[in-house]
Amino acid sequence: MSGEAVALSSVLLDLKRWARQRQRAGRKHVHFEAMSVDAAPAVLPKRAGAPSIDAAAALAILERERVVGCTRCKLHGSRKNTVFGVGNPMASLLVVGEAPGRDEDSQGEPFVGAAGQLLNKILAAIGFAREEVYIANILKCRPPNNRDPEPEEVAACLPNLLEQLEIIRPKIILALGRVAAQNLLETSAPLGRLRNKVHAYRDIPLMVTYHPAALLRNAQYKRPTWDDVQKLRELHDKLVRG
Ligand code: SF4
């Protein structure tokens, strides 16, 4: 059995154990499909229809089993902490940045420090509390000196974000900055051409705006960012209303 399969097997066993505990505690609506490791998909079990597993528990297991201690790319050697993600496990809005910076690496949480505070304000301006959305990065470890992620690092780490996406199942994604947008959309188009459009990532609508760190350096980005997030809120509300 491959190392990947062993890790997935461990995740599935944890989920089954957790489901049995919930059933013993009298929770009637716990469903967990039997799944052999060989037949297991590349992502955690889907929460199709009625949720079959608790999203918070699934995220915690994913973080513990697949991210903390991960050595799939060279960034593991220089990180202080992995930075998995934070927020509402059932969020309708998923905010995605490129990678942790120095403050995030120190604290193990995405978007802390000045850029994080600005993100909180941007979210608040369109009526979202930080706790209401889910915030994550493409890379879970900090690239040295905050350089751009390398393609092999993105390839190694992106499956973690895909699994987060599968668990959270947001209605819409907001990509912050050129690097996040280009990597998610697999394009080299400049940020200016990616804004003002509704893209799709794994069939989920995705919109693009400036990274808060860029706003801190360039005040002229504030107005277009405000325009972007207002449009995002409008589309979000339509999607939530169905
Ligand atoms: S960046 Fe991602 S793939 Fe690379 S070591 Fe960290 S968690 Fe693993």
Image (cartoon, grey):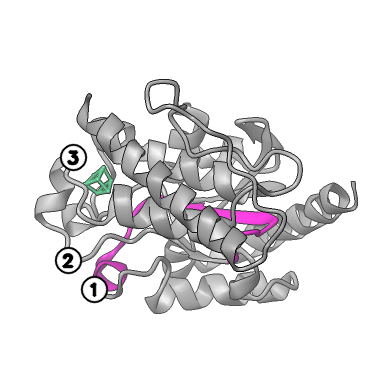
Farthest residue to the front: give it: 24
Determine crowd level at label 1: few under 14, some 14-19, many 20+ residues with C-alpha closer than 10 A: some
**Disc 2 vs disc 1: Cβ atoms closer than 8 Å?**
yes
Give the residue displayed 50% in from the left and 60% down from the top. 57
Say what secondary structure mark 1 lies in.
Answer: helix
Badge 1 amino acid = Ser
Measure the alpha-carbon separation of dots 2 and 3.
15 Å
Question: Does the image show residue 134?
Answer: no
Label 3 CB, ligand 1: below 8 Å? yes
Residue 80 got which mark?
A: 2
Q: Position of residue 35 (x, y in %)?
A: 49, 30
Say what secondary structure mark 3 lies in.
Answer: loop
Say what secondary structure mark 2 lies in.
Answer: loop
Q: Counting residues from the N terminus, which is met first, the one under dot 3 or under dot 1? A: 3
Badge 2 amino acid = Lys
Residue 242 vs residue 176: left or right?
right
Badge 3 amino acid = Cys
**Disc 2 vs disc 3: Cβ atoms closer than 8 Å?**
no
Where 178 falls versus 202 (above or below)? below
Instruction: Judge whether residue 214 is colored magenta.
Output: no
Q: Which residue is mark 1?
A: 106
